[in-house]
Amino acid sequence: MSSLIPKKIREMEYRIEADPSKGMKVPVTIYADEKLLQKMLTDRTIQQAINVSTIPGVLKHVVVLPDGHEGYGFPVGGVAAMDAKEGMISPGGVGYDINCGVRLIKTNLTEKEVRPRLRDLVSELFTSIPSGVGSKGAVRLSSSDLDEVLVKGVQWAVDHGYGSKDDADVCEENGQIKNADPSKISPTARKRGAPQLGSLGSGNHFLEVQRVDQIHDKEAAKKMGIFNEGQITVLIHCGSRGFGHQVCSDYLRVSEQALSKYKINLVDRELACVPNSSEEGESYRRAMFAALNYAWSNRQMITHWTRKAFERVFKQTESDLDMKLIYDVAHNIAKVEKHKIDGELRSVVVHRKGATRAFPQGREEIPKKYRDIGQPVFIPGSMGTGSWILLGKPNSMDLSFGSTAHGAGRMMSRSAARRDFTESQVQKTLSDKGIFIKALTREGVVEEAPEAYKDVDAVANVSHELGIATKVAKLVPIGVIKG
C-alpha cells in the first residue's frame, strides 16, 4: 500500500513516479488539496490511475483531477493521452454515459422576478421535460431519423425547429462531430436510443434554475452574458441515455475479445482497449462519435423545451427573456488532439472520463465568440450547493492535456446515501436553503443528497490555484428537476 501514497510535488500537486516493476510506463499526477487526496486514498481511485499508466502507448502521465473517484477501469475525473499511431483507445476511458455533459443558458431575469413564480416554473419544467430511468422523449424517431441525429447532432435539432444556429455555434465541436457512423451501432443500441431523445434520464442528471451568486472575473462573465449577481441561469446536465450506455457495453465486449488478437496484456480487464488505428478502434470511435452527437441533440431539445416553459410561465418570448446558450461542453469523450510532449507536438487520443476540456485563448477549437478569452468550463455541484463557471487557461495544456474537473465528485456511494438519508430530510435541507425540487422518485432525491458529494468550491479552487481553469462566477440553485 505504501507505494500508493503519492509524493507532494508542490501545493495541490502530488505524484506517483513510474514503477516499471508494476508495469507503469508513465507517472500518475494528482491535482487535489489534502482533504480531497485523502478521500481518493479510501477507494481505488489512485490504484486505477496506476493501472491506466500500464496501457500500451500511454504518454507523459495519467492525470487525476480534484473530483477523482473510483470508476469502471479508469477513475472518474481521469485524463490519459495515448499515442494516436501506437497507442490504444479504450471504451472504459470514456465511460458508459458517452458525452454526459453540461450546458448553461442565460436569461435577463432576476431572482426577485423568478421567486414568486418558482414553484410554477419548476412544475412546468418537470412536466415539459421527460426524466427518470428509461424515460422516453416526446419525439418518435424512425430509423432514418435516428441515423440523421447520429450524424448531425445539434444541427438535426435546429433543422427541426428546436433552437437556432446560434446554439450550435457555442457547443464543443459545434455540437456535430465529424465521422460518426450509424452503421457501427448495434440494433440493441438503436432500439434503446430511438425513444429516448429529448429526455433527462436519472442518476446525477438534473436541470437547475440558478442565480448568479458571485462574479470573480467581470470581463469573462460579461462576454458570456452574465452581468449581475442575482441574474437567473439554467444548467442542464445529461448525456446519451441508454443509447451511449449500450454503445459502451457493445464495444467493451469487442475490445475484450480483441485483446488476444493484439497480444495486449492488462492488469485489469476493465481497461479493455484496442489499438487506436485498428479496425476495432476505428469502429468504436465512429460509434462513440454517433453517441456524442446523440447527446448534443438530446441537450438541445431539452434546451428548447426549457425556453418554452419559461415563455409560458413568464408570458414573454425566449427572445424577450434573452435565453441564449452560453456554452455546451462534454465530459465523457475521447478525441485526437495535438499536445506538446517532451517538447514535440504529437497527435494523441485524449481520454477525458469525468473531465472537461479547458482550452486557453487562441485555440481554434474554441468558438469564435470566446477565442480571445478562453473556453468556458462548467463544474456542476450537487443540487444543494452550487456550480462554477471557469475559464480555460494556458497551464491546462502543460498540466492536464487541456482539461479540468467535471463536477464535485461523489463522497459516498448511492447505496450509502440511501441508507443515510431520507427523502423528507433532503427535501427539508433544500427547502431551508430556498431550493424547490421536483423529482420522479425517492431515489432521485436521496442518492443525490448534497452531503453525498465533495465540496465543489474546493474542487474549483484547485483548478483555479493551479491556473488550469480560473474562476469566473459561482451559481447556486433555486429550483431543481431530477429523474
Image (cartoon, rainbow, N blue to C red):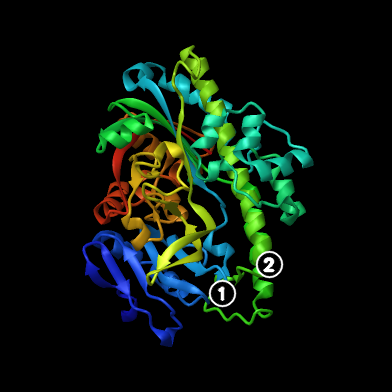
457 vs 63, left or right, is left
Most extreme residue toward the left, as rendered? 11
- The image shows residue 94, relative to residue 375, as above or below, that is below
2 or 1: mark nearer the eye: 1
In this picture, residue 13 sits left or right of residue 477: left
| SS label for mark 1 | loop
Between marks 2 and 1, how big is the CA–CA gap? 14 Å
**In this view of the protein, which residue sits in the foreground, 53 or 179?**
179
Q: Looking at the picture, which amino acid does disc 1 mark?
A: Glu
Q: Is mark 2 on a helix, strand or loop?
A: helix
Say whether disc 2 or disc 1 marks the residue closer to the N-terminus: 1
Residue 460 in the image, given as x and y percentages of width and height: 30, 49
Q: Mark 1 points at which residue?
A: 86
Q: Residue 129 carries which label?
A: none
Q: Name the residue under label 2.
A: 280
Circle 2/circle 1 CB separation < 8 Å: no
Write the residue at 73% across / 44% down: 147
| Category of crowding for the residue at label 1, using alpha-carbon neighbours closer than 10 angstroms: few (below 14), some (14–19), many (at least 20) | few
The answer to whether residue 327 shows anywhere in this view is yes
| Residue 109 placement (x, y as % from top left) | 38, 20
List x then y, in percent, for residue 115: 36, 20
Q: In this view, does 243 lie above or below 254?
A: above
Residue 409 versus residue 224: which sits nearer the camera? 224
The N terminus sits in image quarter:
bottom left
Instruction: Tell me if residue 23 comes above or below residue 38 in the rendering.
Output: below
Amino acid, disc 2: Glu
Q: Where is residue 307 in the image (x, y as percent from the top left)?
A: 52, 24
